[in-house]
Every structure is written in structure tokens, then in C-alpha cells.
Amino acid sequence: MSVRYPAVAGQFYAAEKEDLLQSIQECFTSKLGPGKTLGDAPPTPIKGVVMPHAGYMYSGPVAAHGYLACSSLKHVKLAVIVGPNHWGIGSGVATFRGGFWRTPLGNVEVDDAAAEALVKASGIVDFDETAHKREHSIEVQVPFLQYIFKQGFKILPVSMALQDHDTAVDVGKALAKVVQARDALLIASSDFTHYEPHEEAQRKDLELVKTILELDVSRFYTVLRRLNVTACGYGPVACIITAVKELGAEKARLLKYATSGDSSGDYSSVVGYASIVFT
């Protein structure tokens, strides 16, 4: 059985188990985090989330807002994680055939049946492990999932090099079919504006976030193009909006927005991060 080994442990997050657990805990308790522990999360009928995927020291506290909300979900058996393919290696849209993904917190099994069902439901998704080998956007979500759900869940990783409107909608509808009879959480992994001054990044990102909160995929792409928002995972976001709408989601809520400048103190050139939940 294949094992997908960590590509960015020791870079985006700590490579040792105890150090990683401590850093995740600090994401929850930091000044940019929710300031609450997992036991403080009120029950929320979450169908999907948007999460950032930078190094934990930068985006981890923003992600912690979303993962705190998700920790109230008691019956998640499948976490679908859709992220961009930064490297452009492998198929245009790729999932992973069985096996395990390894992190410093242990192994997480890939849901082979769900992966097979997704490939059958969409004419776009392929099996291609090479698309996942070096990619961090999905990997960095897994330790957070292990932290909040412990054991008993599987993942369905989907890497998108193709991020156009039609591809995102196709994959989103296919995912909705796959998970409709499963206890699933859908995750779009994306950072927002890259390497612009803080105020400009915030202005662009919050206008784009408005379209996400309206669950409006067409307007999302319009604003993305009009403002030239350099969000790296725009396809995964559109994909998950499509899927959660198919599954009955009617609302979305921005839990936290921040930039790398809020962590580093350098506001001259930042990356934007948002944590959003769909219910």
C-alpha cells in the first residue's frame, strides 16, 4: 500500500510530533487565533470551509478559527481537501488512489472508494500521485485535521492545476454526488492576495470574500479577474462553493481575515488569509 510522505514538514510546520502539537495549540491561543480551545466550540452544521495553507507561523492562527468551528462536528468520517497545484506537475485535476498520507502525527488513510467514485463521477479527475508528491496546499491541512478529529477519519485529496470556472463547477458537482451519503467535511485550501501592500491586499481580498459569502461562483470569477486577485486556490474555492450549494448550504460566514503582515510586522508585501465556513 502506497505512502505519501511529508513534503514540507520542517518547513511549513514542525517535523517532530511534540513540536507540531505545541505549534498547533499555539495557533488556537495566539492573538490572531480564536483564543479558545477545542472544547469551547459550539455545535455548528458546517458543510465546508475555506482554509489558508501557508506556514503555520503565518496562516495557522487564521486556520485555527475554522478548525475550532469544525471541531464541533462529531461524526466526520471523510475530509475532502481540494487545493491548487502550485508545481504544475501531473494531471490537471488529480486525486490519490488508496494508501496513506503520513505526517509527524501519524498516518491518515485515503478513502479509496470515494476516490474511485469521484473519478467515475467527473470526466476531468484522474488518479495521479505525482501531482501530490511535492504539493503543500493539501498536506498542511492534515495535521490540523488529526489534531481536531484524532483518529477515525479518512481523506480525499484533490489537486487542481486547472482552475477555470467550468472545471471547478464540474468537480464540485461530482464531489457533491460522492459525499452526499457520507459524513464529510469539504475543505478548499487557498491563500488570497500575494505580495502586495497590506491595505491593498485587504481591499481586494474582502471584496472577493463578499462573493464567497454570497455563494456566487460566477461573480467570484468576475471579481477575481476585475481586481486581479492573486489567490492561488481560486479553483478549489469555486469547487467547494459549488459542492456545498449542491448539498444544501445556504449561508457562509467569514470567521477571520488577516495577512502575513499581522504576524511578521512587515506590511509592505503581504499574503492574505481567510477562514470561511459554509452552513
Image (cartoon, rainbow, N blue to C red):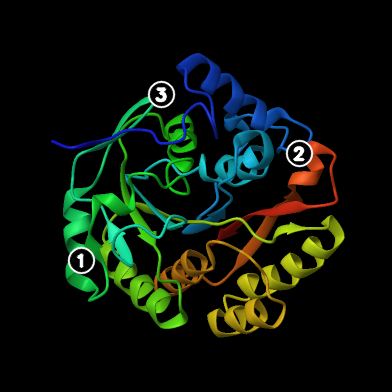
Q: CA distance from mark 2 to mark 3?
A: 25 Å
Proximity of marks 2 and 3: CB atoms separated by less than 8 Å: no
Q: Give the percent coordinates (x, y) of residue 174.
A: 29, 72
Residue depicted at 52% across the width and 45% down the height: 70
Residue depicted at 33% across the width and 49% down the height: 132
Q: Give the percent coordinates (x, y) of residue 115.
A: 22, 56
Q: Give the percent coordinates (x, y) of residue 184.
A: 36, 53
Image quadrant where residue 180 sits:
bottom left
Discs 2/3, front: 3
- The residue indicated by pointer 2 is 32
Point out which mark residue 119 bears: 1
Q: Few, some or many C-alpha atoms within 10 Å of disc 1 (few <14, some 14-19, many ≥20)?
A: many
Number of marks: 3
Q: Give the percent coordinates (x, y) of residue 152.
A: 30, 34
Image quadrant where residue 217 sits:
bottom right
Ranked by sequence position, the earlier of labels 2 and 3 is: 2
Considering the numbered disc 2 on the image, is that residue within a helix, a strand or a loop?
Answer: loop
The amino acid type of the residue labelled 2 equals Leu
The amino acid type of the residue labelled 3 equals Pro
- The residue indicated by pointer 3 is 104
Left or right? Give the position of 262 relative to 232: right
Instruction: Find the residue positioned furthest to the left.
Output: 1
Ranked by sequence position, the earlier of labels 2 and 1 is: 2
Point out which mark residue 190 bears: none
Classify 60 as above or below 177. above
Q: CA distance from mark 2 to mark 1?
A: 39 Å
Image quadrant containing the N terminus:
top left
Image quadrant where residue 242 sits:
bottom left
